[in-house]
Structure formats: structure tokens, C-alpha cells
Amino acid sequence: MIPSLLLLFTLAATAFSAELSLSVSHHYAGKPVFLDSFRYQTAQQETYALTRISYLLSGFQLEKTDGSRLELPDQYAWIDHQANTHFRLKNIPEADYKAIHFNVGLDKNSNHLDPAKYPADHPLSSLRNLHWNWAEGYIFLAIEGHQLEGKKGFVYHLANDHNLTPVSISQSIKITNNTHIDLNLDIENLINSPSPIHFLTDGNISHSAKDDPIAAKLKRNLTNSFSITKISSLQQPVKEKLKALYMPETFTPYPFSLPSHIPIPALPTDNPLISERVTLGNALFHDNRLSKDNSISCASCHQQQFAFTDPKKQSTGVNQATSLRNSMPLQNLAWKKQFFWDGRVSKLRDQVIFPITDKAEMHQDIDLLPEKINSLSPLFKKAFGNQEITTEKITLALEAYLLTLTSLDSKFDQSIKGNTTLTKQEQRGLKLFFTENDPRNRKRGADCFHCHSGPFFSDDSFHDTGLPSITDTGLERTTGKATDRFKFITPSLRNIALTAPYMHDGRFDTLEKVIDHYDHAHKTTPNLDPNLSKHGTLGLQLSQDDKAALVAFLKTLTDPKFK
């Protein structure tokens, strides 16, 4: 395009810009894809089920009828079959176009930027569980699942700069400010055409080495797997910013500071962090009157010296009742989206009510609590502008306090800043932690990073980790789905050396026993995570030195202030 036309095109984009709404669906043989269902086949008639479809899109361009292209720089989309299938593109001139172009993956520059520069809700945030690690950039595409034959998992990850995959879709598109495009990714094409992938001959693991045949086939197949299924008009919803609740006339903003390698959290806009509210929440957290018989407080089962956990397998409540599960740590909750081992609530302010009212924990009648803690009314006045005590204000104050419990200053964090150096053993453990165990490609690692990913060493997702002889069905208790049986949320590994015992039921009292569990082959169960079942009957086969190095690295995640 000649400079003058380019200038006119840029001016048009500025003067008459629209916002384009898009969504992506996933189909197989023309029908919507269902996860955890053995209904799909490779070209060799190998039956499989999918458990994860997640990827990044970038490099968007719209091609005009005259062949010129409008580039949309620095716009990205994170698509996840379970969590997010919708995105928007901005600053688009209202006009007629004949094609849309984009990349699966990121260009070299974007791929190696620090993910902490993005806020928590950005497509490239490390919290999207597609950031590989600090050295190797992003996973562009993650397809995971189970094979029926052989009862093994498969984990196909397309990544690395050389696997950036361009996609072009030719179709007439008239864009106005309420245009919506439905895209489709054909999973049958992705696995079978034009380069069929076979589990038996190609293998069940791919992490995109330059000579990896699975990565090469995924890249070829992706180019013709996307299509436009519908173009329609969609009224853009107006997002209302939540107003701050019960703000006092004078207040002190709470100094919420972060190191540069941690993403900015999406804090609640209706409950601003102010010191007066945090002070009240702190008082409530340590107040025994929140329990029915005034015997325990929140801090009784979330003790700071144990990274706000309980050293018992199950905590003791009023009348010596015991809780169902091991107490979870209360660190870095500002970045979490789901709470409890079974993910039953999505807001921290809702979470705090459960232990207060649970018969096995504090067993408090919530309607009687305001009068019971009436002596705190001066603190309520400072925090909310008046001294009236309500259940809602109690939850907001506790939420505010809990949001401030950050743990981001471990030896590992200091090493990232360049203020200290990990020992050779700790460095060996770090490498094992972030290395795929793939004997076919002569890679030996501990494979921890799949679930314990990102700056908080947790994907905040749910997995069946092959624990034998358990009766607690985990996520299934929340969703009612058999496909969620025995799945529990991934806990953060920060301060892991302080939070024994481990697992949802506290069955392991040492880190060595936890590592032994993941090192061994697991009995195949319907929902066993593919990142475990892919190892088959051999397991990881870590040496004793490997295990000791892993423990040494995990201990670098301890924050001194939690000791």
C-alpha cells in the first residue's frame, strides 16, 4: 500500500472505528466437542477423549476488498474450551472485508516478553496456564486427553518460535459496531488432516522440539482447521463498573505493592483495599467470638507460622468436631478465582461464610454474630462510615484482610531479582521441575510444571492425581458430574515446606512422600489426569538424587515472613 493510502486507511480507522466481537467453538465431524467422552477417533481408528483445548491467537489482520490489509497490533485472544471462548478486536474501520488472518501462537518478541507485565485478566497473563516458564515462552496450543486403547494419556503442546502458525479465512465480512463472527476449530481436522496423528506410531507426548513429528503435523493441520460459521449482529453489552460499597468519608489506601515478576491482580472494585477495612478484617480473623462457643477463630486453623494452614490432617472445630479436609493455605488469594478444594465458590467474600457457619468448624449462627461482636462497632465505623454491623460488612472486611496476605519474597523470588543464587542442587531441582518427562525424545524430568505453573506454582484447576483409596469425591460434590470425580484443585507450592501434611486429606506428612507418589505409575482411573497417565506403567523413574534436588528447590519457595 502506498504511503498516502496507508495514511487515509489509518485515519479511517481512527475516525470510524468499531469493535468486533468474536467467539470460537470446537467441533468434531460437525458436532460440538464434549470433554471427557470417548467418542473421537484418529485416522487409525484409535479412540480418544479430550480433557483440554486451550490456545493463543495473535497477529490479527483484516483484508479489504482491494487487497490491502488492516493490521491490529498488540491484540491477543486466549481461548479455552472450558473457561473462555469469546474475545473482541478494537479500532476497526467500518467497511467491507474479504478475509481475516491471524496466528496460532505469538511472534518471537511477544513470546519472550515477561508475562508479569500483563494484568491478571490479560490473554497473555501467566495465570492463563499457557506460559511455559520464565525461559521458554508460551505454549501456543494445548490439546490433552486420554487414549482408550492402552489406557494412557496424551499431551500435545505446540510451542517455540518456529511453530508460529498463520491461519487465513476468506469470506466476505461487513463490519459495523455490532458485528459478531462465530469461528470454529475442527478438532477432527486438527488430528487427522492433512497429516494424520497416530498415538501408537507418533507417541503421546509433544513439546515442540524442532524435529518433533507431532508438532509438525499439528502445525500443518491447523492451517485448514479454522472456519467462519456465522456472521451476525450483536448488541454490545454495556459493562457497569461496580460501585464501592459503604465507603467512609475519610480513609487510607492500603499499600498493596508487588515485585516486578508478579502480575497485577484484578482486585474487587466494589471493595477497595483501605487500611481501615484491612484492620477490621484482621481483628475479625483473630476473634474467637466468630465461633459458637468462643473457642476458636479463623487463625486457629490458619496459623501464620504454617503459611496460614493447620499442621493437623483435619482441623478441630467446636465440640471437638473435625473438618472434612486439610486446611488450605491463605496466601496470594488476590489472584485466585475458585475457593475450597472442590471449588464451590468463586468469590472470597462468599468463601469466608462457610467455615463460620459449618457445624464441623465454627458452627456460628450468622444472624446472631453482629450483636455478639458489637464491641467492634468503632472499627466498623472507620471501615464503612457507620457503626452498624451486618453480615455483608463482615464478609467484606474479611475479604479485604485476606487479599493482603501475599507471599512473594522467597529465595526463588530473590534469585529472579538477581539478589541471590540458587545452589547447584536447587538449580537441578528447578530444571527437573520444569522439564517434561519424555523418554521418546530423551528428556527426563519431574513434569511438575503442567499443574504447578505460573508465578504461584498452581494452575488453579482441578485434577485427579491418582490417590488410592479415597472416598471424598472432590469436585463432583460441587458439579454433580461423574467426570469430575476425585478431582481437587491444585494448591500453590509457595511455602510448601511449611504446610505439611499434604493433599486434600493430609495423607502425606513429608515432601519426599509426595514426590514418591508422583514418581510411581498410577492405577488407571476414568478421570486420571493425562499428565500422569501418559507415563504408563513406568512412571517417572526419578533417582534419589533427583528427588533430593526437587525437595531442595521446593524449599526455596519459602517466604521468610511466613516462618
Image: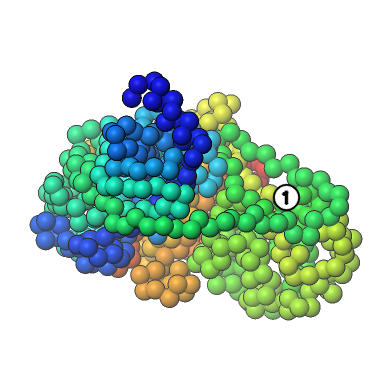
Q: Residues within 10 Å of mark 1 (few under 14, many from 20)?
A: many
Rendered position, 328 above or below 218? below
In the image, residue 357 lies at what x, y percent?
Answer: 67, 75
Q: Is residue 498 left or right of residue 435?
A: right
Rendered position, 269 above or below 416? below
Secondary structure at badge 1 equals loop
As drawn, the residue found furthest toward the left would be 44
Q: Nearer the viewer, residue 84 or 127?
A: 84
Looking at the picture, which amino acid does disc 1 mark?
Leu
In the image, residue 279 lies at what x, y percent?
Answer: 80, 53
* Res 415 quadrant in image: top right
Rendered position, 229 above or below 60? below
* Res 439 quadrant in image: top left
* Residue lying at 36% horizontally and 53% vertically, measured from the top left: 181
In the image, residue 498 lies at what x, y percent?
Answer: 58, 50
* Residue lying at 61% horizontally and 35% vertically, measured from the top left: 259
Q: Is residue 198 visible?
A: yes
Q: Is residue 356 left or right of residue 537?
A: right
Q: Nearer the viewer, residue 49 or 61?
A: 61
Q: Is residue 213 left or right of residue 506?
A: left
Image quadrant where one finds the N terminus: top left
Q: Nearer the viewer, residue 127 or 499?
A: 127
* Residue lying at 56% horizontally and 39% vertically, measured from the top left: 262
* Res 248 quadrant in image: bottom right
* Residue located beneath label 1 in the image: 273
* Residue lying at 37% horizontally and 57% vertically, measured from the top left: 232
Colour style of the rendered protein structure: rainbow
Q: Is residue 397 visible?
A: no
In the image, residue 192 lies at what x, y percent?
Answer: 15, 52
